[in-house]
Image (tube, rainbow, N blue to C red):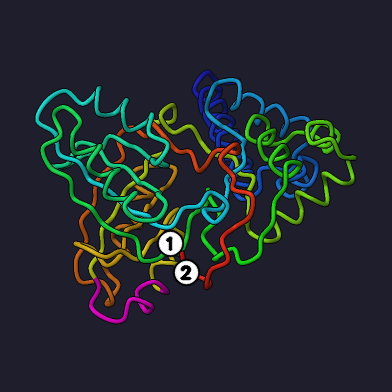
């Protein structure tokens, strides 16, 4: 074989493998408990190769398969996005934000704000108290707060439904807690953890998932994935927000929220390369429903964590359905 051909074939093989890995991990993003055999069938490979790709990603710290919990079951009532400007070293602020139970997302970002965070809190004055604690951190110079009116899309977490009448017990909590450690635990393992039969564990998990109470997801550990860029975007619209939401959905954003404050909407765009993300931004700018956008690169995502099992309340508050 000519020497010039061999490197080209190796490069093509590596590209094909990377593409397969991307497609497989995307399947787990949508359903962390998806059957490896069915994934293999859909993508023309073997169950063994799917297992190897997934296990390799987990072992290298590139993927975390866990359970995300509905805000309804965690008692969350207010949601906000914070952009934080600093006048000194960021490390102490970053560590404090990551440690706060109210933060679900923390990233170091480009632009005039050094770091951002999404917070989820209970009833007032929890929001004000949380922001005051952040404002008191060393080197915090300014906080720009955007209150979410509704969350329309979140690939890695259930969205709020109001949760009227949703009941959970100790067995449900034990199942969820075990899934946080191993999102693909067998039903026998879940049953042992909860003190119920495997079939009982299956039924309980299916009920929780069907009601939108939990979602098992494969979350990329993107602090270790510099090749997978994400972009935060603040949007102002020219027409009804509902019309703009419909157009933005065409871009398949990871996250989309209607906001109150400086932006009408806040979204997260992602792709396999910078070119992918730039193309999405160009499409966003071209929509007639969009009047202005601000964007910032998530240079390093240091926290993506949507709830803790031991904080699940006994029953969701009976409330009017909310769009969050």
In this view, the residue in front, 170 or 228, is 170
Image location of residue 173, percent across then percent down: 68, 41
Q: Quadrant of the N terminus?
A: top right
Tell me the crowding category of disc 1: few under 14, some 14 to 19, or many 20 or more residues within 10 angstroms, Cα based: many
**Which quadrant of the figure has residue 92?**
top left
The residue tagged 1 is 151
Kind of element beneath mark 1: strand
Q: Is residue 278 above or below residue 17?
A: below
Instruction: Report the label total.
Output: 2
Rendered residue at 60%/38% (across/down): 309
- Residue 297 left/right relative to 156: left
Kind of element beneath mark 2: loop
- Span colored in magenta: 237-246
Q: Is residue 295 visible?
A: yes
Image location of residue 231, percent across then percent down: 32, 47
Q: For the residues marked 2 and 1, what is the alpha-carbon distance in whole angstroms?
A: 7 Å
Tell me which secondary structure the magenta stretch mostly adopts. Answer: helix
Image location of residue 219, percent across then percent down: 54, 39
Cβ–Cβ under 8 Å for marks 2 and 1: yes
Q: Is residue 23 visible?
A: no
The residue tagged 2 is 323
Rendered residue at 34%/47% (across/down): 275
Task: Say which mark, if any, is on residue 7.
Answer: none
């Amino acid at each position: 074989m000519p020497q010039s051909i061999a490197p080209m074939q190796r490069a093509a093989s590596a590209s094909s493998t990377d593409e397969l890995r991307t497609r497989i991990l995307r399947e787990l993003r949508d359903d962390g408990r998806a059957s490896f055999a069915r994934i293999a069938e859909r993508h023309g490979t073997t169950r063994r190769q799917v297992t190897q790709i997934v296990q390799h990603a987990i072992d290298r710290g590139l993927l975390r398969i866990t359970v995300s919990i509905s805000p309804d079951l965690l008692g969350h009532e207010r949601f906000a996005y914070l952009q934080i400007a600093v006048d000194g070293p960021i490390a102490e602020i970053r560590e404090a934000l990551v440690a706060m139970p109210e933060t679900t997302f923390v990233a170091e970002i480009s632009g005039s704000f050094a770091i951002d965070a999404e917070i989820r809190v209970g009833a007032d004055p929890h929001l004000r108290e949380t922001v005051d604690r952040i404002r008191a951190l060393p080197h915090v110079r300014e906080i720009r707060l955007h209150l979410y009116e509704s969350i329309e899309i979140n690939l890695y977490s259930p969205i709020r439904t109001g949760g009227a009448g949703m009941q959970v017990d100790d067995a449900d909590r034990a199942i969820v807690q075990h899934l946080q450690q191993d999102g693909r635990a067998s039903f026998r393992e879940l049953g042992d953890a909860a003190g119920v039969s495997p079939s009982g564990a299956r039924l309980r998990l299916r009920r929780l998932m069907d009601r939108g109470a939990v979602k098992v997801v494969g979350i990329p550990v993107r602090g270790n994935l510099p090749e997978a860029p994400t972009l935060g975007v603040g949007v102002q619209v020219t027409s009804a927000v509902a019309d703009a939401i419909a157009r933005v959905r065409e871009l398949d954003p990871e996250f989309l929220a209607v906001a109150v404050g400086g932006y009408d909407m806040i979204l997260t765009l992602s792709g396999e390369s910078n070119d992918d993300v730039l193309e999405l931004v160009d499409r966003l700018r071209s929509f007639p429903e969009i009047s202005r956008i601000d964007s910032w690169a998530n240079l390093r995502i240091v926290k993506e964590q949507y709830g803790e099992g031991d904080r699940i309340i006994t029953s969701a508050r009976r409330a009017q359905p909310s769009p969050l």
